[in-house]
Amino acid sequence: QVHLVESGGQLVQAGGSLRLSCAASGRAFSSTTMGWFRRAPAKERAFVAAINWSGTNTDYIDSVRGRFTISRDNAKNTLYLQMNSLKPEDTAVYYCAGRREYSVMSTRVMDYNYWGQGTQVTVSS
């Protein structure tokens, strides 16, 4: 079992940067593949980025590749999403999510078993 709490969301101007954090409780974090998802206004929750349990592999949607970086610190039980060159279309509630231990990365919401409560990111133009 992994309990997740996101933080770091706020209002930022276009072109700015933010770093989201996701604090995880539970000893399973270091063996849990993690992901970031977002829900924009009037849209479904959608995949943003994923990282495998060891941190050696990552995946991104095309629209954030080169601007966002997912990383993790297993010693601190924390997942990060560094977001640079933010655009108004990045405005959304951002969620961190975890899969069961030693699972492969996935872009599908249905494959993730643990979810945080979300943190709001608003990018003004």
Image (spheres, grey):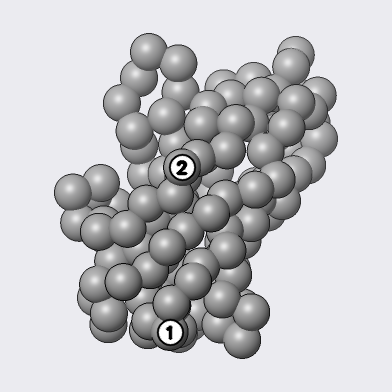
Instruction: Give, as a three-letter code, the residue at label 2.
Output: Gln
**Residue 87: % across, % down:** 66, 27
**Residue 41: % across, % down:** 45, 16
Q: Residue at x 67, y 38 (%)?
A: 9
From what the image shows, is residue 10 above or below residue 108?
A: above
| Quadrant (top left, top right, bottom left, bottom right) of the N terminus | bottom left
Task: State the SS at label 2.
Answer: loop
Label 1 belongs to which residue?
A: 27
In this picture, residue 9 sits left or right of residue 43: right
**Residue 64: % across, % down:** 54, 43
Instruction: Give, as a three-letter code, the residue at label 1.
Output: Arg
Q: Residue at x 31, y 26 (%)?
A: 44
As drawn, the label of residue 121 is none
Task: State the SS at label 1.
Answer: loop
Quick check: can you spot residue 63? no
Label 2 belongs to which residue?
A: 117
| Of 15 and 71, the residue lying toward us | 71
Q: Residue at x 38, y 81 (%)?
A: 28
**Mark 2 / mark 1, whichever is N-terminal:** 1
| Quadrant (top left, top right, bottom left, bottom right) of the C terminus | top right
- Crowding at label 2, few (<14), some or many (≥20) Cα neighbours within 10 Å? few
- Distance between the Cα atoms at labels 2 and 1? 20 Å
From what the image shows, is residue 15 above or below residue 99?
A: above
